[in-house]
């Protein structure tokens, strides 16, 4: 039961992503309505049913507007797990300060990028100009703040059923916009 299920508030606003076990429990407790199912079939003692893919809460849950936090995972997600210097997607990624701390570069959205170990080692504590690197995309704070985590939101945009329920933001990474346009 490793499948993930999109949970919508009663007004169809994305609220959370939960695992299949939690979604089935919510179904049997009568707390959600199933909007879309998956091809996987779940067998129980009393019968079988299609596994849910998208569920909607029957009662509205009030949540404060979430705050997009600066974290390693958020930087990786914003940069689509791709080195911003060489463009390669690597397994061993690090975070690099575009302007090194010793030159006054801070730990901010506008100064941190996803970087492969090879480029990070080559750059060290030098500036981008000193090493001769160019950025694939200039870093900046995303304007979109989904209720679900940034990584779950970007992964969710790859699911064709979930796309109908996820809001579209103008400043999504180019790779994610291309994925969205393929589905339309």
Image (cartoon, rainbow, N blue to C red):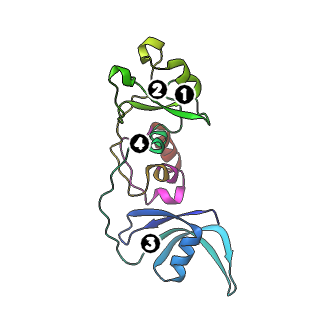
The residue pinned by badge 1 equals 87
Mark 2 or 4 closer to N-term? Answer: 2
Q: How busy is the neighbourhood of tag 1: few (under 14 within 10 Å), some, or many (20 plus)? A: some
The residue pinned by badge 3 equals 56
Which label lies toward us, 4 or 1?
Answer: 1
Magenta span includes 32: no
Give the distance between the C-alpha atoms of the residues marked 2 and 3, in whole angstroms: 39 Å
When the figure is inspected, residue 143 is found, relative to residue 55, above or below; the finding is above
Point out which mark residue 136 bears. 2
The secondary structure type at the circle numbered 1 is loop
Q: Is residue 111 left or right of residue 155?
A: left
Point out which mark residue 172 bears. 4
Q: Which residues are magenta?
A: 154-173
Mark 2 or 3 closer to N-term? Answer: 3
Give the distance between the C-alpha atoms of the residues marked 4 and 1, in whole angstroms: 17 Å
The secondary structure type at the circle numbered 3 is strand
Mark 3 or 4 closer to N-term? Answer: 3
Q: Residue at x 34, y 74 (%)?
A: 60
Query: Magenta: predominant secondary structure element?
Result: loop
Give the distance between the C-alpha atoms of the residues marked 3 and 4, in whole angstroms: 25 Å
Is disc 3 in contact with disc 4, using a CB cutoff of under 8 Å?
Answer: no
Mark 2 or 1 closer to N-term? Answer: 1
Q: Residue at x 49, y 70 (%)?
A: 55
Foreground residue among 29 and 13: 29
Residue 95 position within the rendered picture, expressed as x and y whole percent measured from the top left: 48, 33
Is disc 2 in contact with disc 4, using a CB cutoff of under 8 Å?
Answer: no
Mark 4 or 1 closer to N-term? Answer: 1
């Amino acid at each position: 039961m490793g499948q993930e299920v999109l949970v919508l508030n009663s007004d169809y606003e994305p609220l959370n992503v939960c695992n299949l076990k939690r979604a089935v429990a919510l179904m049997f407790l009568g707390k959600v309505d199933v909007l879309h199912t998956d091809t996987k079939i779940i067998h129980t003692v009393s019968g079988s049913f299609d596994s849910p893919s998208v569920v909607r809460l029957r009662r509205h849950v009030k949540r404060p507007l979430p705050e997009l936090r600066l974290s390693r995972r958020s930087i990786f997600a914003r940069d689509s797990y791709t080195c911003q210097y060489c463009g390669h997607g690597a397994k061993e990624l690090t975070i690099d300060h575009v302007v090194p701390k010793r030159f006054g570069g801070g730990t901010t959205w506008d100064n941190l990028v996803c970087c492969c170990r090879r480029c990070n080692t080559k750059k060290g504590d030098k500036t981008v100009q000193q090493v001769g690197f160019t950025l694939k995309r200039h870093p900046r704070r995303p304007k979109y703040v989904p209720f679900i985590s940034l990584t779950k939101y970007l992964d969710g945009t790859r699911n064709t059923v979930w796309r109908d329920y996820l809001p579209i933001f103008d400043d999504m990474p180019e790779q994610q916009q291309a994925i969205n346009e393929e589905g339309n």
